[in-house]
Image: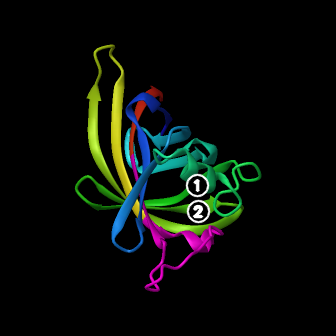
Amino acid sequence: MASTIWQLDPAHSEVTFRVRHLVIATVSGKFSTFSADLSTDGDDFSTAKIDFKVDTASIDTGMDMRDNHLRSDDFFNSEKFPEILFHSTGIKKTDDGEFKLEGNLTIRDITKPVSLKAEFGGTAVDPYGNLKAAFEVSGKLNRKEFGLRWDAVTEAGGAVVSDEVKIHANVQFSKLRA
């Protein structure tokens, strides 16, 4: 079967994260620069192969001082490690419109296998005649396993920043060719 190439539509996509702060609150952020390569056998997304890249310097939490700290060696070290990479190793349909996406995630040159939930939003033809496909991808990771080890403790002994980070991506792709 012919391979279908899908192009990421960054104007209709987002990559966000959430992490607990001081145990009592949540801080949200996003990455504004990212790209993806997606191919499928025909239009069958259960055969999807995906490579996703995120520019670590594009982190945005709405606070310059925090963003600069996250770009520093305490966290991403954006100068030395400019990209977060995800390479899929398998996809399995778990329910109608739901998939388990397996792959290798690389942050700071540390690669670990991860499992993500992918929900297929469907396909639609836009006003220009382009076939679009959308997905919502979510998961959790332990930041310290990827070398993001900065830590501090409050007076009460709680962590300033949780080890667990929730990641979320809403992505839309345009079918290029089969």
Tell whether position 142 is magenta.
yes
Across and down, in percent, residue 107 comes to 64, 60
Residue 148: image location, x then y, percent: 62, 67
Q: Nearer the viewer, residue 84 or 152?
A: 152
- Is residue 135 rendered to the left or right of residue 106? left
Could you tell me if residue 33 is visible in this image? yes
Q: Are circles 1 and 2 on residues that touch, CB within 8 Å?
A: yes
- 35 in relation to 50, above or below: above
Q: Is residue 111 magenta?
A: no
Q: Secondary structure at mark 2?
A: strand
Tell me the crowding category of disc 2: few under 14, some 14 to 19, or many 20 or more residues within 10 angstroms, Cα based. some
Task: Indicate the amino acid at tag 2.
Answer: Asn
Residue 104: mark: 2
**What span is in magenta?**
140-169
Residue at left offset 46%, top offset 44%: 62
Q: Nearer the viewer, residue 140 or 51?
A: 140
Residue nearer the viewer, 78 or 3: 78
Local crowd at mark 1 within 10 Å, few (<14), some, or many (≥20)? some
On the picture, is 15 further left or further right than 26? Answer: right
Report the residue that reaches farthest toward the left: 96
Q: Mark 1 is on which residue type?
A: His
Q: Which residue is mark 1?
A: 87
154 relative to 67 in the view: left or right: left
User: Can residue 100 be seen here?
Assistant: no
- Extreme-bottom residue of the structure: 157
Residue 39 placement (x, y as % from top left): 51, 41
Determine the image quadrant of residue 72: bottom right
Task: Label 1: state its secondary structure.
Answer: strand
Q: How far apart, in angstroms, are the residues tagged by discs 1 and 2?
A: 5 Å
Q: Is residue 58 above or below residue 94?
A: above
First-in-chain label (1 vs 2): 1
Residue depicted at 40% across the width and 63% down the height: 139
